[in-house]
Structure formats: C-alpha cells, structure tokens
Image: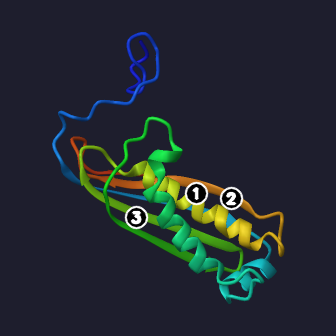
Amino acid sequence: MSGLTHLDASGAAHMVDVGGKADTMREAVATGRITMSPAAAIAIRDGAAKKGDVLAVARVAGIMAAKRTSELIPLCHPLPLTRVAIELTPDDGGVTVKATCATEGKTGVEMEAMTAVSVALLTIYDMGKAIDRCMVIGGIKLLEKRGGKSGTWRAPPPAT
C-alpha cells in the first residue's frame, strides 16, 4: 500500500517479521538537549538541586528506558541490549545527552537510543523544574547507526 514497513498490504499496522534476518552487531547513537536558565544549569551541574544528583538519576533513567523501549513504542521489537551508555554534558545553558545502545540481533537499536535520550532529558526536567519551569527539551535525533544489511549511516552535519 504505502511502502512503509509497519503497514501490511491493506494498510493495517503490524510488527515487522525479522525472523529471516541474520544476527549482526548493531549500534546506534542519539542525542538531545535541554536548555534552561543559568541558575538551573549551575545547580544541576554542581549537584545542588533539591531533589539530589540530577545527572546521576538521569543516567540511570536513560538506561532503564532503553531496556524498556519495546513496552513504550508500539510495534518495536524487544531486544537483548548488550550495552547502554549515557553521556551527560552540562554547560551554562543546559545539558546535552548522548546515548549509545548496542545489541547482537536481527534489528537495530535506533529507537532504544532515542528513547534513552528522551527519558534522560525528561528526568532532568522533572528534577529541575522547581528551579526553572521554562526548560526546553529539543533536538532529539539519531546521530549514527551501524550494523545490519544497510551498514553504517551517519546524520549529516548541521547546516551553518
């Protein structure tokens, strides 16, 4: 009907059958950012938020989210993740989150990486909202994926 992999010939949603695909090493890297007031950024960076160590909790939340992606995203395959790494880079205007997810399997881990980033950012918002309710989450995107039949893909560099 539409050429979309999650729609059958009649247009009904379905989970893609990956049974015939070979297991390969797969990795995906995603990023996103939360911007905030300097006061919130300093408190989060310095571990001075009233709710505790925001960055440590956000890291754990991102890892947990990656592991539960198939429960959150309809039609997403459950995957045995072999690695989830969350990098949090605070600065004077917010925090950038980068997630790397890996598995050896029949389908990629792009959704796991983007889910990890999203939930880590939401956790930062939740723990920092007492300082700044105007924080903005954005720029969530896939940076790179490796493995599978299509090989390596990298996002084009941002326009200048």
Q: Nearer the viewer, residue 142 or 8?
A: 8
Give the secondary structure at mark 2.
strand
In x, y percent, where is residue 7? Answer: 42, 21
**Residue type, mark 1 in image:** Ser
Q: Is residue 72 above or below residue 80?
A: above
Residue assigned mark 2: 137
Other residues around mark 1 within 10 Å, as few (<14) / some (14–19) / many (≥20): many
**Quadrant including the N terminus:** top left
Q: Residue at left 68%, top 58%?
A: 137
Residue assigned mark 3: 100
Residue assigned mark 1: 118
In x, y percent, where is residue 70? Answer: 45, 46
Q: From mark 1 to mark 3, how far is it between C-alphas?
A: 13 Å
Other residues around mark 3 within 10 Å, as few (<14) / some (14–19) / many (≥20): many
Earlier sequence position, callout 1 versus callout 3: 3
Q: Residue at left 23%, top 46%?
A: 148
- Between disc 2 and disc 1, the foreground one is 1
Q: Is residue 146 visible?
A: yes
In x, y percent, where is residue 61? Answer: 55, 67
Give the secondary structure at mark 1.
helix
